[in-house]
């Protein structure tokens, strides 16, 4: 069965054009008649979402406009450029692992890389065996006591060892 997507642009006051929208979403209807929705994320992948529903129900500001698949593909490129704009200017990352009572340094809860963007933002990603580096907020969660644990700095050379460790975990 081939999925036929319907694409939508979420336009806002700060991103009022469908040529450069805040978010692009896609919907499809399954064989049971259930509509599903995804949006294209800052992790540069399609993920489950409900932007169209939230805007149409008034829970989220902005407007929803139908767009072509071509415009959605262009948005993927726009989003990639936005993400690249936040990468470290010097290409340098700091690496750490999230260590808790249940997750010691030899089996940490997460592998992180952090950096300061050219705009001055503190950025963070965690590494997953299935999707690589994804946006995360472990540092925030630990700093504000929402998560027990601490960050332990590691060298760039240690990153490969931890990635291999995560790949070895059963999925």
Image (spheres, rainbow, N blue to C red):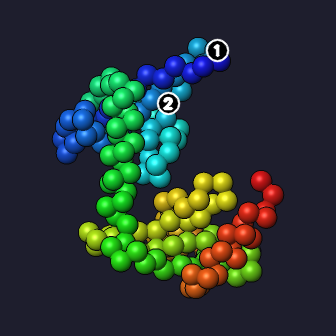
**Residue drawn at 70 percent across, 82 percent down:** 105
Give the Cα separation between the discs numbered 1 and 2. Answer: 15 Å
Give the residue number, with chain letter if any, for mark 1: 32
Q: Within 10 angstroms of label 2, few (less than 14), some, or many (20 or more) residues?
A: many
**Residue drawn at 33 percent across, 25 percent down:** 67
**Residue drawn at 33 percent across, 73 percent down:** 89
**x and y, in percent, of residue 132 in the image:** 59, 59
SS class, disc 1:
loop
Which quadrant of the view contains residue 133? bottom right
The correct choice, above or below, for 56 with respect to 136 in the image is above
Residue 130 can be seen, yes or no:
yes
The correct choice, above or below, for 22 with respect to 136 in the image is above
The correct choice, above or below, for 38 with respect to 154 in the image is above
Q: Is residue 66 left or right of residue 141?
A: left
Give the residue number, with chain letter if any, for mark 2: 37
Q: Which mark is residue 43?
A: none
SS class, disc 2:
strand
């Amino acid at each position: 069965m081939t999925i036929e997507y319907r694409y939508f642009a979420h336009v806002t006051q700060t991103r009022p054009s469908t040529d450069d929208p805040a978010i692009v979403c896609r919907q499809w209807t399954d064989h049971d008649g259930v509509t599903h929705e995804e949006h294209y994320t800052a992790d540069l992948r399609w993920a489950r979402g409900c932007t169209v529903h939230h805007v149409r129900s008034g829970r989220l500001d902005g407007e929803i406009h139908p767009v072509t698949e071509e415009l959605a593909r262009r948005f993927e490129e726009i989003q990639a450029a936005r993400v690249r704009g936040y990468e470290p200017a010097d290409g340098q990352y700091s690496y750490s692992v999230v260590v808790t009572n249940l997750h010691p340094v030899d089996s940490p809860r997460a592998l992180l890389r952090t950096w300061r963007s050219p705009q001055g933002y503190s950025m963070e990603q965690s590494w997953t065996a299935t999707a690589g580096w994804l946006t995360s907020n472990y540092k925030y969660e630990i700093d504000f006591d929402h998560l027990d644990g601490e960050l332990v700095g590691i060298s760039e050379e240690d990153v490969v060892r931890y990635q291999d460790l995560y790949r070895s975990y059963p999925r």
